Image (cartoon, rainbow, N blue to C red):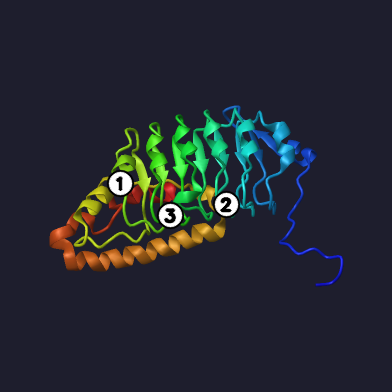
């Protein structure tokens, strides 16, 4: 290594307070949204802590690996989008964002141990997207999200769905597509759970970068072909499960 040069990854774009202030827009419903999406950011910009009174924060499509404990300062935050980054863990202070309604963590490097128990303290959370991560199991803390209405779990490594999470009182939309669930003949109980959530989608197209959206489309097409083949073989026993999400075909594009 040449003398005087330091080893390390890409520095990424530096976000100044001026850039951040100019990135604040007012939404249709009057909320202030700070959008720093797709800007080549590698570390959480400390300067935005001076703008912690915003209601919405978009840090998606960057290369951020860590969210600091200081995220707790965003007490007015109702909407947080960190999808398509390189997150491996969330801070415990995430649980202090009591006004948070929407949390998008799609397309990161998260697993069950990445989520702190404190995430279960988000008593007002309605929408949670954990799709396209590395979840093999779901942490029990998610059972504390009693107000959760929509849950995205697509493109993970799940082989089971905990009853406490599936039976959350207000959960009415769940996307479990493209997980390695056992075959129907191996686990009838699991298939019954999937039946109850088979018509549900969570991700809006605008919430995914082009490459992620294209990948989802291609994988879904492959899965549909496989399921159509399987349906002809097991139609008599699993007719209602031959094409998961079949009842949602009309609204499929709206959610994906």
Q: Dots 1 and 3: beta carbons under 8 Å? A: no
The image shows residue 230, relative to residue 56, as above or below, that is below
Badge number at residue 197: 1
Does label 1 or label 3 sit earlier along the sequence?
A: 3
The image shows residue 190, relative to residue 218, as above or below, that is above
What x and y, as percent, mark residue 253?
A: 42, 51
Dot 2, how many residues are within 10 Å of its Cα: few (below 14), some (14-19), or many (20+)? many
Dot 1, how many residues are within 10 Å of its Cα: few (below 14), some (14-19), or many (20+)? some
Badge number at residue 87: 2
Does label 2 or label 3 sit earlier along the sequence?
A: 2
Give the secondary structure at mark 2: loop
| Front one among 37 and 48 | 48
What x and y, as percent, mark residue 129?
A: 46, 46
**Residue named by callout 3:** 135
Does label 1 or label 2 sit earlier along the sequence?
A: 2
Alpha carbon of mark 1 to alpha carbon of mark 3: how far? Answer: 18 Å
Q: Quadrant of residue 52?
A: top right
Dot 3, how many residues are within 10 Å of its Cα: few (below 14), some (14-19), or many (20+)? many
Badge number at residue 2: none
């Amino acid at each position: 290594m040449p003398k005087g040069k330091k080893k390390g990854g890409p520095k990424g774009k530096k976000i100044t307070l001026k850039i951040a202030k100019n990135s604040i827009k007012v939404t249709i419903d009057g909320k202030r949204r700070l959008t720093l999406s797709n800007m080549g950011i590698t570390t959480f910009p400390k300067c935005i802590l001076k703008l912690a009174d915003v209601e919405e924060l978009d840090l998606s499509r960057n290369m951020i690996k860590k969210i600091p404990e200081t995220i707790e300062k965003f007490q007015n935050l109702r909407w947080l989008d960190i999808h398509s980054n390189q997150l491996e863990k969330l801070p415990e202070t995430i649980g202090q964002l009591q006004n948070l309604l929407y949390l998008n963590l799609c397309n990161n490097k998260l697993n069950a141990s990445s989520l702190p128990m404190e995430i279960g303290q988000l008593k007002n959370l309605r929408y949670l997207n954990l799709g396209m991560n590395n979840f093999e199991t779901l942490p029990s803390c998610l059972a504390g999200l009693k107000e959760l209405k929509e849950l995205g779990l697509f493109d993970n490594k799940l082989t089971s769905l905990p009853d406490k999470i599936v039976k959350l009182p207000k959960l009415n939309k769940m996307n479990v597509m493209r997980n390695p669930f056992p075959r129907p003949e191996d686990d009838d109980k699991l298939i019954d759970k999937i039946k109850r959530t088979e018509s549900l989608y969570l991700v809006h197209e605008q919430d995914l970068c082009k490459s992620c959206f294209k990948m989802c489309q291609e994988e879904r097409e492959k899965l549909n072909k496989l399921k159509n083949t399987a349906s002809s073989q097991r139609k008599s026993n699993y007719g209602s499960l031959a094409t998961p999400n079949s009842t949602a075909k009309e609204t499929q594009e709206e959610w994906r």
